[in-house]
Amino acid sequence: MEVKKRRQVLSSALDAFFKYGFKRLSMKEIAELADVSRAGLYMDFKDKEALLNAAILHYAEVLIEEIEEGLKNKKTTEDKILFAFEVWSIRSFEQYMTSPEAKEIIEGYLSFARESFDASYKRLESLIASLIRAHFRDDDSKKVLSADRTAHLLVSASRGFKLVAKTGVELRRMLHDQLRLDLGIARKTSE
């Protein structure tokens, strides 16, 4: 399958998974929605789990591209990292909160898509680490942990916050607070 067609198939498949759920959707239905033959779909993906895993990795790349493009308009490290989490975490959280099908995929990822989710989050960690490195470039004495470790903690915290937060607003606030702690960004807030 050519690259452009593969991207289109993966986007269609992910949309279908979030709309209909993983369990209820067949490869035949996905092929129809993606406008490819079922045999063609099976040539690239051995089963529905392989397709979901590929779709998750594709979606992560799409989000990373969106984040990298949006970073050009952000001035501070805090704004850049918050933008990354807005695109990556908060938007998907709000979708998750309103879609039982999205919940099924997110909650069931441990059994059938863990490697893809973990690889996706590693990609986000790498992007966040590069932003943190740039933040501390001029004054390394303020850094307590490595950029990679700090990024890992931020991203891991964001994953846990999704389990605790009840709204996108609450998740956003938790991410803001964690970022200030991890980067040592002291700022007066009205609480």
Image: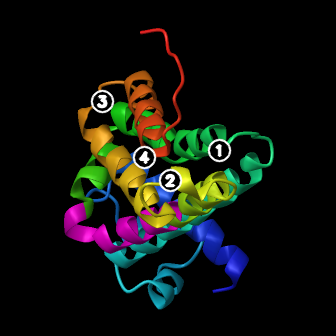
Q: Residue furthest front?
A: 141
Circles 2 and 4: CB distance less than 8 Å?
yes
Which residue type carries mark 4? Answer: Lys
Residue carrying label 1: 77
**x, y percent for residue 128:** 55, 57
Disc 4/disc 1 C-alpha distance (Å): 35 Å
Q: Which residues are magenta?
A: 110-125
Horizontally, residue 103 falls left or right of residue 85, namely left
Instruction: Please determine whether, in this image, residue 138 is positioned above or below residue 85.
Output: below
Circles 2 and 3: CB distance less than 8 Å?
no
Q: Nearer the viewer, mark 4 or mark 1?
A: 1
| Residue under the image location 43 percent in, 26 percent down | 173
Quick one: SS at disc 4?
helix
Front residue of this view, candidates 21 and 71 = 71
**Residue 33 at least partly seen:** no
Which mark, residue 15?
A: 2
Q: Is residue 179 magenta?
A: no
Disc 1/disc 2 C-alpha distance (Å): 32 Å
Q: Nearer the viewer, mark 3 or mark 1?
A: 1
Q: Residue furthest right?
A: 73
Quick one: SS at disc 3?
loop
| Residue under the image location 50 percent in, 53 percent down | 15
Residue carrying label 3: 165
**x, y percent for residue 83:** 61, 40
Front residue of this view, candidates 57 and 122 = 122
**x, y percent for residue 73:** 80, 41
Q: Residue furthest bottom?
A: 43
Q: Nearer the viewer, mark 2 or mark 3?
A: 3
Residue carrying label 4: 19
| Residue under the image location 44 percent in, 85 percent down | 42
